[in-house]
Image (tube, helix red, strand yellow):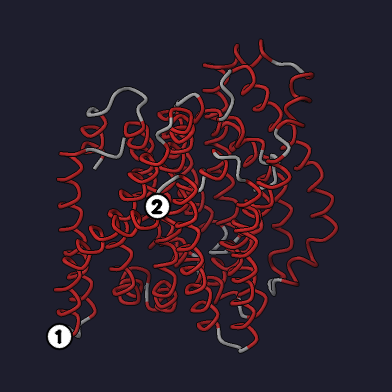
């Protein structure tokens, strides 16, 4: 796989969009392959309760991490001059330091109340780690967008490998040391992120330290604080709601049901996030500066359309296939106690597919200065999905809560995707026309699978059939991309 990506990279000019995507993917491939191999080990070291504790902790970290830099890190990519961008970088670091400092006394005072409200008192002592990891995450976000602006995607790919390796080794080692307590997952994640952030900081200081030092100006920082105020006023809340929407199930499932239910959801979400991290994340990071350049040159509609088609073609079949084999696959790979997680995945897969398609394109809101619209869109999505989870919780059914959450998310992200395409100048009729090809190709692969599934009762046979279908799809798409390349 890495050799194939290297061969594809050589087809693109240095620092082109396609090359940047593949550079990021080359680092992510190793990271995700490692996580795939580590997952069965972790599910045997830690039980559903341990994964539930980690899911609640990480949900809180993700929600508060959105505001760690006041969203000024997103503005680093936009200025034409590097000096202005360097001062935005320093501004985001200063806000990160302040946010983490203020978070500690709040966590110290309210950690027991937070843990009890989430129906997991064992979480309380480990929340003291949250301010430290909030600081590390904020520093990483600032460095990440500075590297994105400078198109240092090789550096960012190395960071992914470092974080995955550190997290995996830390969680496995602590799993043995702490006898499967969920805190091993918490500290393992902190170890991995700290190592990766430290390495990225060293590389940034080595390569760009002189530029950052010589352009530093408190006067400029104060001016930028006001000029880009829409980021904290609107993008912060947009990002907060978007992240909360993703992490909300773990929090509300923890409130209404047991930690084990949270653990089932957490593992399912973890598996579904693999393609998001592997491909969607790489595309999102490379697409933002690329879309900014396309907007200035008048090519934004075509750039957005090509990326949309690429993501639809790439994701539709794998996610549809996952809805068919998830329960059997989870039982075989992770053990009998995790089959419920596979059932949850069936109801979440198509929603995550739409997130996979739309998330890279969501930077259009910032490129076009539509943060206010993005705020209201995310407010609608958050309110609708909170209602879905509460309804399932009040009915006393975790499965119903997950079903309502998945279906609501699917419908809302369809609307969000169409809105983004419309803002970018891609017509509704053109978007529908573009869908015919990926839908036809997916049905072509899925039709014999659906027929065979009705005849094969053995779970292992179904899984083998599903993987054979996926392998044929990868070969088909890989051959095409080797010939045609990625969207430019």
Q: Secondary structure at mark 1?
A: helix
| Count of numbered badges drawn on the protein | 2
Question: 486 or 250: which is nearer to us?
Answer: 486
Q: Left of 333 or right of it: where is 276?
A: right
Q: Quadrant of residue 307?
A: top left
Category of crowding for the residue at label 2, using alpha-carbon neighbours closer than 10 angstroms: few (below 14), some (14–19), many (at least 20): some
Residue 111 vertical position relative to residue 85 in the rendered view, above or below: below
Q: Secondary structure at mark 2?
A: loop
Q: Are marks 2 and 1 in contact (CB under 8 Å)?
A: no
Residue 148 vertical position relative to residue 482 in the rendered view, above or below: above
Point 29% across, 57% down: residue: 433
Say which residue label 2 marks: 427
Q: Left of 355 or right of it: where is 366?
A: right
Point 43% across, 28% down: residue: 297
Residue 361: give x, y in percent of width and height. Answer: 46, 47
Q: Nearer the viewer, mark 2 or mark 1?
A: 2
State the mark number for residue 455: 1
Which quadrant holds the N terminus? top left
Q: Quadrant of residue 158?
A: top left
Category of crowding for the residue at label 1, using alpha-carbon neighbours closer than 10 angstroms: few (below 14), some (14–19), many (at least 20): few
Residue 169: give x, y in percent of width and height. Answer: 46, 47
Distance of label 2 from label 1 (alpha carbons) = 43 Å
Point 59% across, 55% down: residue: 186
Q: Left of 209 or right of it: where is 26?
A: left
Residue 303: give x, y in percent of width and height. Answer: 37, 39
Point 20% across, 53% down: residue: 474
């Amino acid at each position: 796989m890495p050799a194939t990506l290297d061969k594809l990279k050589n087809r693109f000019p240095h620092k082109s969009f396609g090359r940047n995507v593949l550079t990021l993917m080359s680092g992510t491939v190793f990271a995700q392959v490692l996580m795939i191999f580590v997952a069965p080990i972790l599910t045997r070291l830690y039980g559903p309760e341990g994964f539930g504790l980690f899911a609640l902790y990480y949900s809180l970290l993700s929600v508060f991490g959105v505001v760690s830099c006041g969203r000024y890190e997103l503005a680093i990519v936009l200025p034409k001059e590097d000096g202005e961008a360097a001062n935005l970088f320093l501004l985001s670091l200063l806000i990160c330091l302040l946010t983490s400092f203020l978070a500690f006394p709040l966590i110290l005072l309210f950690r027991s109340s937070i843990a009890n409200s989430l129906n997991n008192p064992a979480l309380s002592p480990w929340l003291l780690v949250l301010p430290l990891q909030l600081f590390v995450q904020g520093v990483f976000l600032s460095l990440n967008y500075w590297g994105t602006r400078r198109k240092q995607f090789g550096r960012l790919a190395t960071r992914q490998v470092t974080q995955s390796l550190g997290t995996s080794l830390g969680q496995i080692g602590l799993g043995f040391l702490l006898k499967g307590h969920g805190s091993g997952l918490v500290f393992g994640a902190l170890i991995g992120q700290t190592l990766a952030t430290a390495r990225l900081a060293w590389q940034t200081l080595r390569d760009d330290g002189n530029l950052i030092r010589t352009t530093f100006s408190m006067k400029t920082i104060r001016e930028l604080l006001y000029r880009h105020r829409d980021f904290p006023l609107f993008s912060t809340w947009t990002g907060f709601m978007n992240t909360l929407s993703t992490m909300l199930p773990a929090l509300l499932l923890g409130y209404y049901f047991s930690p084990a239910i949270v653990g089932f959801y957490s593992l399912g979400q973890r598996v579904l996030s693999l393609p998001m991290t592997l491909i969607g994340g790489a595309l999102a990071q490379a697409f933002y500066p690329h879309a900014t350049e396309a907007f200035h040159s008048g090519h934004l509609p075509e750039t957005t359309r090509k990326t949309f088609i690429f993501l639809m073609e790439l994701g539709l079949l794998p996610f549809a296939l996952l809805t068919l084999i998830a329960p059997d696959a989870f039982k075989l790979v992770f053990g009998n106690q995790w089959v419920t997680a596979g059932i949850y995945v069936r109801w979440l897969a198509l929603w995550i597919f739409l997130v996979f398609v739309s998330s890279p394109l969501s930077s259009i809101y910032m490129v076009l200065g539509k943060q206010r619209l993005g705020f209201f869109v995310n407010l609608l999505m958050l309110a609708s999905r909170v209602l879905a989870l509460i309804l399932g919780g009040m009915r006393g059914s975790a499965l119903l809560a997950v079903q309502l959450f998945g279906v609501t998310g699917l419908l809302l992200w369809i609307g969000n995707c169409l809105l983004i395409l419309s803002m970018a100048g891609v017509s509704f009729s053109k978007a529908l026309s573009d869908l015919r090809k990926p839908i036809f190709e997916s049905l072509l692969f899925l039709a014999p699978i659906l027929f065979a599934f009705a005849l094969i009762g053995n779970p292992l046979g179904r899984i083998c059939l599903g993987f054979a279908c996926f392998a044929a799809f990868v070969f088909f798409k890989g051959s095409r991309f080797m010939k045609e390349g990625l969207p430019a």
